[in-house]
Image (tube, rainbow, N blue to C red):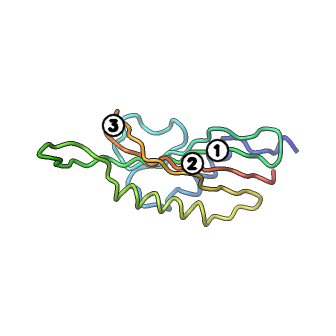
């Protein structure tokens, strides 16, 4: 039985397949550190933080990060960049809907939390969606 338990590579693959071609993001969908370092696109990145290795149910956590370029805004007469909140919100709702509505035999992906974060290296904000896994089958 233990040879058939899921690994983080498996859960990353599940999320990648769930989201590929099903959202309106204008960039790519990547696994782990596969996103180009200089990307300025609307990208989605999935990665698994942890996953039980030797017991059923397998409990774990993954991230879905949705990157959106910042927008320039005039705030008190000064131009500065700010999160493109409307676009982050649209993509977040799309991703959450896909995860919530997907039925996988013996596997449940449960959206746990969402947090908006700033990525200063590329002047983008991203939505971090935490996914809890409950895997009952091998």
Instruction: Name the residue at the front extreme.
Output: 76
- Local secondary structure at mark 1: strand
For label 2, the residue is 130
Mark whose residue sits in front, 2 or 3: 2
Q: Are marks 2 and 3 in contact (CB under 8 Å)?
A: no
CA gap, disc 2 and disc 3: 22 Å
Q: Crowding near pointer 3: few (<14 within 10 Å), some, many (20+)?
A: some
Q: Quadrant of residue 78?
A: top left
| First in residue order: circle 1 vs circle 2 | 1
- The image shows residue 29, relative to residue 3, as above or below, that is below
Residue drawn 14% across the image and 46% down it: 76
Residue drawn 75% across the image and 40% down it: 52
Mark sitting on residue 4: none
Give the total of numbered labels. 3
For label 3, the residue is 122
Residue 130 x/y as whole percent: 57, 48
Q: Are marks 1 and 2 in contact (CB under 8 Å)?
A: yes
Q: Quadrant of residue 50?
A: top right
Q: Are marks 3 and 1 in contact (CB under 8 Å)?
A: no
Residue drawn 66% across the image and 41% down it: 9
Q: Nearer the viewer, residue 51 or 26?
A: 51
Compared across the picture, whether 56 is left or right of 19 comes to right
CA gap, disc 3 and disc 1: 26 Å
Mark sitting on residue 61: 1
Residue drawn 59% across the image and 52% down it: 112
Compared across the picture, whether 44 is left or right of 121 comes to right
| First in residue order: circle 2 vs circle 3 | 3
Q: Crowding near pointer 1: few (<14 within 10 Å), some, many (20+)?
A: many
Mark whose residue sits in front, 3 or 1: 1
- The image shows residue 4, relative to residue 122, as above or below, that is below
């Amino acid at each position: 039985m233990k040879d058939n338990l899921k690994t983080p590579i498996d859960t990353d693959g599940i999320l990648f397949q769930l989201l590929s071609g099903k959202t309106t993001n204008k960039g790519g969908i990547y696994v782990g550190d596969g996103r180009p370092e200089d990307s300025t696109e609307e990208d989605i990145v999935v990665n698994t933080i942890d996953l039980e290795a030797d017991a059923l149910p397998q409990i774990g956590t993954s991230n879905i990060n949705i990157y959106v370029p910042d927008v320039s805004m005039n705030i008190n007469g000064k131009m500065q960049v700010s999160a493109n909140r409307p676009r982050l919100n649209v993509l977040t709702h799309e991703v959450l809907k896909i995860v919530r509505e997907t039925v996988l035999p013996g596997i449940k992906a449960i959206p746990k939390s969402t947090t908006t974060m700033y990525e200063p290296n590329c002047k983008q904000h991203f939505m971090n969606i935490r996914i809890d896994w409950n895997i009952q089958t091998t």
